[in-house]
Image (cartoon, rainbow, N blue to C red):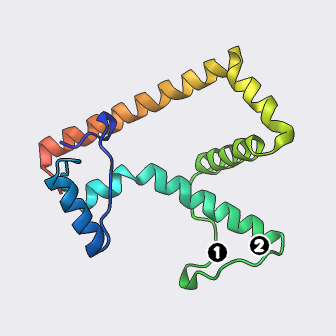
Amino acid sequence: DVDFLQGWSFALVRNEKAKQICQSMIRDRAIIAKDVTRKEALDCNKMMSTEKRWRAFRIIETHRRQGKPIPAYGRYGLEMPKSSGKQFLKTELNMLTHALCFTPRFRISVLKFFLGSGGYYLLWLNSLRRRVRDFIRDNIALFKRKLFGRK
């Protein structure tokens, strides 16, 4: 019954001090807390974690090709995670737009495009696409939860 689109946030308590702080906030009614299952926790962060992982591997690979020192991650190696070409293109486009926004030479052009008439339309379409995607994802999860219960 936790709907993240209705303003719920996800927090992970990792140590005793954080647990005490959260319990204090619950007692003071500063926050409302609900337990979620491991599967629910993983599902709610799936898209974000996938994108972050791809971006991190992309940056590490770029640094490796440039001869910069990179951290050793033990047995995990430094190969790009396997995924579709669609995910690769999304990551590359995301990184390009971020790079352009942080480069003074291109920042004004990018902002003018997105704040101009064509840019608003693209932002609106992207917002609509995300709402439809989230609606489908959330209703499938709700249906599965009603049918099979929480896992």
Q: Is residue 36 in view from this perspective? A: no
Could you say where residue 5 lies in the image, as x and y percent from the top left?
Answer: 33, 36
Could you say where residue 86 lies in the image, as x and y percent from the top left?
Answer: 60, 45
Residue drawn at the location 13% of the way across and 49% of the way down: 148
Could you say where residue 129 lies in the image, as x and y percent from the top left?
Answer: 49, 28
Residue 147, label in figure: none
Residue 78, label in figure: 1
The quarter in which the C terminus is drawn is: bottom left
Q: Amino acid at mark 1?
A: Leu
Rendered image quadrant of residue 100: top right
Rendered image quadrant of residue 146: top left
Give whichever of discs 2 and 1 has the lower sequence position: 2
Residue drawn at the location 55% of the way across and 61% of the way down: 53
Q: Residue furthest bottom?
A: 74
Q: Which residue is mark 2?
A: 64
The quarter in which the N terminus is drawn is: top left
Q: Secondary structure at mark 2?
A: helix
How many numbered badges does the structure rendering display?
A: 2
Q: Residue furthest front?
A: 28
Q: Amino acid at mark 2?
A: Arg
123 to the left or right of 137: right
2 to the left or right of 59: left
Residue drawn at the location 55% of the way across and 57% of the way down: 52
- Name above or below for residue 148 compared with residue 76: above
- Are the residues flagged by discs 2 and 1 in contact, CB closer than 8 Å? yes
Q: Is residue 32 in view from this perspective? A: yes
Residue drawn at the location 74% of the way across and 41% of the way down: 101
The foreground one among 133 and 97 is 97
The foreground one among 11 and 86 is 11
Q: CA distance from mark 2 to mark 1?
A: 9 Å
Q: Secondary structure at mark 1?
A: loop
Mark 1 surroundings: few (<14), some (14-19) or many (≥20) residues within 10 A: some
